[in-house]
Amino acid sequence: MGSAMTIKALLQTEKSSAYGDKGKYLFLVANTANKIQIKKAVEQAYKVKVKNVNTFVSLGKLKRVRHQLGRTTDTKKAVVTLAAGQKIEIK
């Protein structure tokens, strides 16, 4: 699995901007990606040194369309902590 497939997006939300002060960044990643793959992908894509990776799965919400119950897809997110002095430039 390449870095393009592992990392889907760098999430820029209120919560993730609060993480930025602590050297942490929030990424949307592939559901099948593990912590080692995420670490390698971030290091290659952004040329930084990753200290730690924490992952969690956000379960999809129940939706109703035309009286049929359905569900949005589950998403996996990763909080990546960078080594001291490292930074990702957000454009």
Image: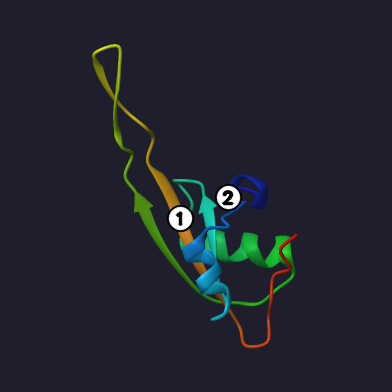
In-image side of 70 versus 44 (left or right)? left
Q: CA distance from mark 2 to mark 1?
A: 11 Å
Residue in the image at 61% along x and 45% along y? 5
Tag 1's secondary structure? strand
Foreground mark, 2 or 1?
1
User: Which sits in the foreground, 63 or 39?
Assistant: 63
In the picture shown, does residue 40 fall above or below 28? below
Farthest residue to the top: give it.
66
Residue 77: assigned label: 1
Q: Position of residue 29 (x, y in %)?
A: 52, 51
Q: Mark 1 Cα within 10 Å, few/some/many (few <14, many 20+)?
A: many
Task: Tell me which label, 2 or 1, sits earlier in the chain.
Answer: 2
Residue 2: assigned label: none
User: Which sits in the foreground, 55 or 14?
Assistant: 14
In-image side of 10 versus 71 (left or right)? right
In the picture shown, does residue 64 fall above or below 35? above
Q: Position of residue 15 (x, y in %)?
A: 47, 65
Residue in the image at 35% along x and 49% along y? 58
Q: Amino acid at mark 2?
A: Thr
Residue in the image at 31% along x and 37% along y? 61
Q: Amino acid at mark 1?
A: Lys
Mark 2 in CB contact with mark 1 (< 8 angstroms)? no
In the picture shown, does residue 36 fall above or below 6? below
Residue behind mark 2: 6
Quarter in which the C terminus is drawn:
bottom right
In the picture shown, does residue 66 fall above or below 1? above
Residue in the image at 37% along x and 58% along y? 56
In-image side of 1 versus 55 (left or right)? right
Farthest residue to the bottom: give it.
84
User: Which sits in the foreground, 20 or 80?
Assistant: 20
Q: Position of residue 11 (x, y in %)?
A: 56, 55
In-image side of 2 versus 15 (left or right)? right
